[in-house]
Image: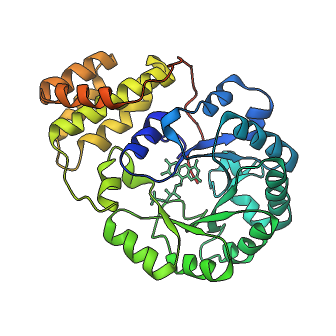
Amino acid sequence: MAGVSVQAFRRQGRRFGAGLVCSEMVSCAGLSHGNERTLGYLRIAADEHPLAVQIFGSEPEVMAEAARMVEDAGADLVDINFGCPVRKVTKTGAGATLLDEPDRACRIVAAVAEAVDVPISVKMRRGLEKGSRQCLAIGPKLVEAGAATLTLHPRSARQMYTGEADHSLTAELVELVDVPVVASGDIVSLAKAQSVLATTGAEAVMVGRAAQGNPWALRQIMGVDEEPSREEVAAELILFIRETARELGEHRATGFLKKFYGWYLGRGRFPRPFKQELTQLASLAEVEQRLLAAAPGARFVLERLEDDLPQGDEILLDLPISVYGGG
Ligand SMILES: Cc1cc2nc3c(=O)[nH]c(=O)nc-3n(C[C@H](O)[C@H](O)[C@H](O)COP(=O)(O)O)c2cc1C
């Protein structure tokens, strides 16, 4: 998820049971131009695997070049974005627009599949307009072109995130292709995951927004239904803050993290004004202190968490926050 799936988020997802995690979408043009910030997206930690890195773009050769760079960086899978509905992306002919350009979309998949040895997956929406069934027309062609799996978020691009994901389309897609299909959209609980898997025949579910500031949702979907204590929540948030600050630098991380405070501290876990208070604090060190004051036992949980983390070389990179946002 653009603006969300930083490395700290992905590592946390893996710790909480996700079988595969995915990067933010990465501009193939940015990679191909050697844009330093875009290259920063290719920083992969040892404990993220298996990891998919998602690329977006509209030119088959440039996408192929980007895919090679992604493979060289150590990704286990190259994912292609045919779902982003955001105008900044669609106006360049990338993202969801490609659903209406099957020939170009297939040329992109074929070029990427030819360029790398790791498997290729495609993430798509149902189509551009409300009620569109274009994913069913294009899905089998993408498989023929070389996609080893398809992920469907069955909302139209126009819908953005309104209404519901219509997983009856996922079921239809499963019938049409002989590769695994991953169901994305509104997977928020074990019950929902089970019902989508049972009614669609999908091989896997993808969890997006439900895991934002709530890795416990992943644990719940994996069958362990334990509400976290306030100490655990505070400790996970502090760890997330520390890792994100290392990844993005203090300045960028300060703005980036604000939305996460509400995600972590909501759900009745902390009083409402507390989140507001955190967003007003000038430094991340103060945020951390305030969290520890509100949940003193978090200190011990945090120590345990940090002890358990694998120690890799920690490179301070000035990584970008994606300005795009969506798929
Ligand atoms: C903030 C945000 C950023 C997203 N960025 C991407 C992206 O970069 N690539 C992508 O394929 N999907 C992206 N998505 C879509 C999600 O992958 C997912 O398909 C969608 O949110 C529906 O699943 P959910 O209900 O579990 O969130 C994004 C969604 C959100 C909310």
Q: With respect to residue 134, does 160 lie above or below? A: above
The quarter of the picture where residue 321 lies is: top right
**Residue at x-position 29% and y-position 16%:** 285
In the picture, measured across the screen, residue 1 lies left or right of residue 73, that is left
Quadrant placement of the C terminus: bottom right
Q: Where residue 169 appears, x then y in whole percent?
A: 57, 78
In the picture, measured across the screen, residue 241 lies left or right of residue 296, that is right
Count the marks.
Answer: 0
**Residue at x-position 32% and y-position 47%:** 214
**Residue at x-position 76% and y-position 49%:** 117
**Residue in front for this viewpoint, 166 or 239:** 239
Q: With respect to residue 195, does 36 lie above or below? A: above
Q: Where residue 102 appears, x then y in whole percent?
A: 81, 67
In the picture, measured across the screen, residue 312 lies left or right of residue 104, that is left
Q: Where residue 94 appears, x then y in whole percent?
A: 74, 51
The quarter of the picture where residue 296 lies is: top left
Query: Please, which colouring scheme is shown?
Result: rainbow
**Residue in front for this viewpoint, 205 or 164:** 205
**Residue at x-position 62% and y-position 27%:** 40
Q: With respect to residue 6, does 16 lie above or below? A: below
